[in-house]
Structure formats: structure tokens, C-alpha cells
Image: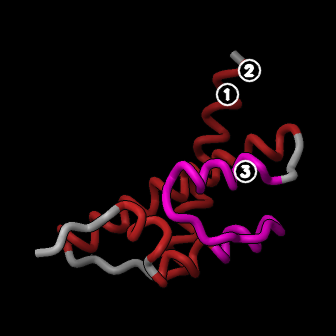
Amino acid sequence: SKLEKTSHLFFKCKYIKGFWIKIFDWWEVVWNQVDGFEYFFALCNKVKIVRIRKSFWLILISAACWTIWLARNGLVFESRRVSMENLIFQSNKRALLWIRFIYNEVML
């Protein structure tokens, strides 16, 4: 079997390209195709969002990457498919949980 590359999984797969376009559109950010994480995180860091919203944005991006990875594992190991709507929902839910956890830690 052919080895899967992270650049394909996270950025070149047509399904995931559509996912990133929807995430970026929701934040009114233009998606640009990237070839790997170095370029992806540079793109995400250059986004013109300020202060707390920038932190939320970067948390969402991290949560989205984690959600893609979990969905991939579900597909590979359990033959479980995830709809685009569910992938977006899970990413947003995960980001909100992480933001809530961070906020609670800061407030202690």
C-alpha cells in the first residue's frame, strides 16, 4: 500500500481543501493552497485578526487539525466516514472546549 503523506491528508485532499475553505470563509479569511504545515501555520499567523480573536482563530486551527487527524484514524481503522458538517461541528466544538479550558485556567 502507498504511504499517506501529511501534506495530502491535511492540505491536498479535495475533501479537506473544501473543509479549509469553509473554515476560512466562516472567519472571512482567504484560503490559499499550501504544501505543508510550515506554510500553513505561516498563513494562519499572518491573518489580520487582532487580540483575543487571533487567539481564538489559532485555537480553532489547532482543533481543526486534530479533528482531521481523528477523522482520518476513524476512517482508516474503523471504516467510519465523517460528513463535512460533522467535521466542521467537531472542530468548532473542540475549539470551544479548549478555549473554555484555557479561560478557566487563566481565571484561577
Q: Identify which amino acid the numbered label 2 is placed on.
A: Met
Q: Position of residue 46 (x, y in %)?
A: 77, 49
Q: Identify which amino acid the numbered label 1 is placed on.
A: Asn
Relative vertical location of residue 43 with respect to residue 5 in this rendering, above or below: above
Q: Kindly identify the residue that appears in the image at 48 percent across and 82 percent down.
A: 15
Decide which of 103, 6 is in the foreground and name it: 6
Decide which of 50, 92 is in the foreground and name it: 50
Q: Are marks 2 and 1 in contact (CB under 8 Å)?
A: yes
Which of the 4 quarters of the picture holds residue 73?
bottom left
Mark 3 or mark 1: name the one nearer the start of the chain. 3
The disc placed on residue 24 is none
Residue highlighted by disc 1: 104
Residue highlighted by disc 3: 57
Decide which of 56, 36 is in the foreground and name it: 36
- The CA span between labels 2 and 1 is 5 Å
The disc placed on residue 107 is 2
Q: Kindly identify the residue that appears in the image at 61 percent across and 71 percent down.
A: 33
Q: SS of the residue at dot 2?
A: helix
What's the magenta region?
Answer: 21-47
Q: Position of residue 9 (x, y in %)?
A: 39, 68
